[in-house]
């Protein structure tokens, strides 16, 4: 029974994560870049997984291909998490103080807060019992925001590299270092952990030789990715 009751959460979450990775995968197929199908990483964490990934086996030669592969994942994932959040919010209910009763207190990203205002006007976030599908969407927003951090080889780092080129290395270090004061300001050590991991394992970026202009359409998509990042980012995602 416990497994059955968790299906709405797990299936919604796997759909969101799969959509994100398939976005990368199909962009790789378009540019004839050798890439694997998505892998899921099961792990006994609070959400039951470490996420999903694809393995890109061949180099990416052009800025346009790099940008498209980088931005396709977050866009595809956001397209799937948005209806999941809408469905989850529509089936949520008001339980006074529910948000502060558990061992973990979840932050509220901007996109979720906007929908809470729409579905439950005047009700505090801490009084809303989020449906499991909505909670899966919350995990999707966190994954999207983390991937869009403008650092190193994250999706956001690829986008920044496509726009900034030789400034990417400096910008990545600036953004990593900015996570340190954020950890102290937000009183959460998770950002400090991310800063250390990203500093040692994700700052280096392969050089792209073809620096052809991205064009207006990709500039618009880059701005859209920035908007998605702002909507999904949470200063204190979990306490």
Image: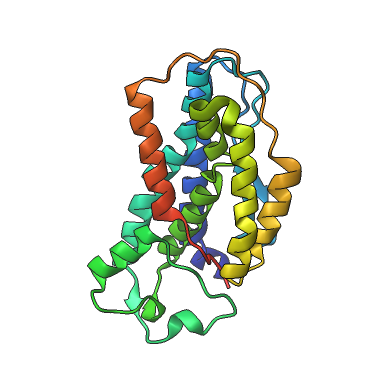
Q: Position of residue 90 (x, y in %)?
A: 29, 65
Which quadrant holds the C terminus? bottom right
In the picture shown, does residue 152 fall above or below 186?
above
In the picture shown, does residue 193 fall above or below 215?
below
| Occupied quadrant, residue 127 | bottom left
- Tell me if I can see residue 26 in this picture: no
In the picture shown, does residue 37 fall above or below 44?
above
- Tell me if I can see residue 109 in this picture: yes
**Is 18 on the left-hand or right-hand side of 219?**
right
The residue under the point 55% across, 50% down is: 146
**Is 70 on the left-hand or right-hand side of 49?**
left
Work out whether residue 118 or residue 166 is closer to the camera in this orientation and state it: 166
Q: Where is residue 111 in the image (x, y as percent from the top left)?
A: 35, 58
Number of numbered discs on residues: 0
**Is 121 on the left-hand or right-hand side of 157?**
left
Work out whether residue 52 or residue 11 is closer to the camera in this orientation and state it: 52
The residue under the point 44% across, 57% down is: 137
The residue under the point 59% across, 33% down is: 168
Q: Position of residue 212 (x, y in %)?
A: 47, 13
Work out whether residue 206 or residue 179 is closer to the camera in this orientation and state it: 179
Which quadrant holds the N terminus? bottom right
In the picture shown, does residue 231 fall above or below 108?
above
């Amino acid at each position: 029974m416990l497994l059955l009751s968790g299906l709405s959460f797990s299936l919604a979450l796997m759909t969101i994560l799969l959509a994100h990775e398939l976005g990368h995968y199909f962009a790789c197929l378009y540019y004839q870049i050798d890439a694997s199908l998505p892998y899921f990483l099961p792990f006994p964490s609070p959400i039951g997984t470490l996420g999903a990934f694809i393995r890109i086996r061949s180099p990416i030669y052009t800025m346009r291909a790099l940008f498209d592969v980088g931005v396709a994942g977050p866009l595809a994932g956001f397209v799937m998490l948005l209806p999941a959040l809408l469905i989850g919010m529509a089936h949520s209910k008001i339980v006074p103080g529910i948000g502060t009763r558990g061992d973990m207190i979840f932050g509220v990203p901007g996109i979720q807060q906007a929908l809470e205002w729409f579905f439950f006007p005047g009700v505090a976030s801490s009084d809303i019992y989020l449906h499991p599908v909505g909670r899966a969407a919350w995990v999707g927003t966190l994954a999207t925001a983390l991937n869009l951090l403008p650092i190193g080889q994250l999706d956001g780092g690829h986008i920044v590299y496509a726009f900034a080129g030789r400034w990417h290395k400096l910008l990545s270090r600036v953004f990593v270092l900015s996570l340190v004061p954020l950890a102290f300001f937000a009183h959460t050590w998770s950002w400090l952990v991310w800063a250390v991991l990203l500093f040692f394992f994700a700052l280096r970026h392969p050089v792209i030789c073809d620096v052809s202009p991205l064009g207006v359409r990709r500039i618009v998509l880059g701005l859209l990715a920035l908007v998605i990042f702002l909507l999904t980012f949470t200063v204190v995602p979990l306490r």
